[in-house]
Amino acid sequence: MAMIASPRRSSWPLDVDIKHLQCAGLPAASLVQMKLSALDQRLVIRKVGALYPGDAGTLRAALGGLLGQDSAG
């Protein structure tokens, strides 16, 4: 799981802006931060939205950079 935050409160390396907010179910400008943690799936109450494919691709590339992998692998 990654953290979603408001851009005005954040400036972390590899932050990824979420451009398609409505698709993601978000009411205001938001970004994904590479603050990763685990969460027991049983604690998830509901799915609010999903990342638009373009946003998901940008996030995958940033995560690959964090893990030392290129975006093709």
Image: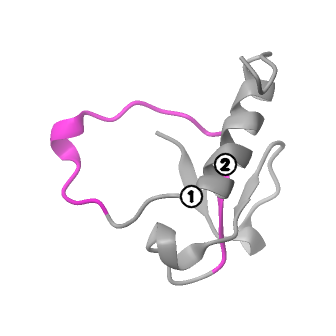
Q: Name the residue: 81% across, 20% down.
A: 70
Task: State the image quarter where residue 20 is shown.
Answer: bottom right
For mark 2, give the secondary structure: strand
- Label 1: few (<14), some or many (≥20) within 10 Å? some
Direction from residue 24 to residue 61 in the image, left or right: right
48 left or right of 18 in image: left
Work out whether 22 lies above or below 3: below
The residue at the point 74 percent across, 69 percent down is 7
Q: Secondary structure at mark 1?
A: strand
As drawn, 66 above or below 4: above
Coordinates of residue 55 in the picture (x, y in percent): 66, 56
Q: Quadrant of the C terminus?
A: top right
Mark 1 touching mark 2, by CB under 8 A? Answer: yes
Residue 10 appears at what percent x and percent y? 75, 61
Predominant SS along the magenta part: loop
Answer whether residue 71 is magenta in the image: no
- Which numbered tag is attached to residue 4? 1
Q: Amino acid at mark 1?
A: Ile
Q: Residue at x 76, y 74 (%)?
A: 8
Number of on-image labels: 2
Numbered tag placed on residue 33 in the rendering:
2
Crowding near the residue tagged with mark 2, few <14, some 14–19, many ≥20 C-alpha atoms within 10 Å:
many
Residue closest to the eye, 54 or 35? 54
Q: Position of residue 33 (x, y in %)?
A: 66, 48
Q: CA distance from mark 1 to mark 2?
A: 6 Å
| Magenta residue span | 29-47
Quarter of the view holding residue 39 = top left
State whether residue 69 is above or below residue 50.
Answer: above
For this orientation, the residue located farthest to the bottom is 27
Identify the residue at image location x=68%, y=56%: 54
51, 15: nearer the viewer = 51
- The amino acid type found where label 2 is placed reads Gln
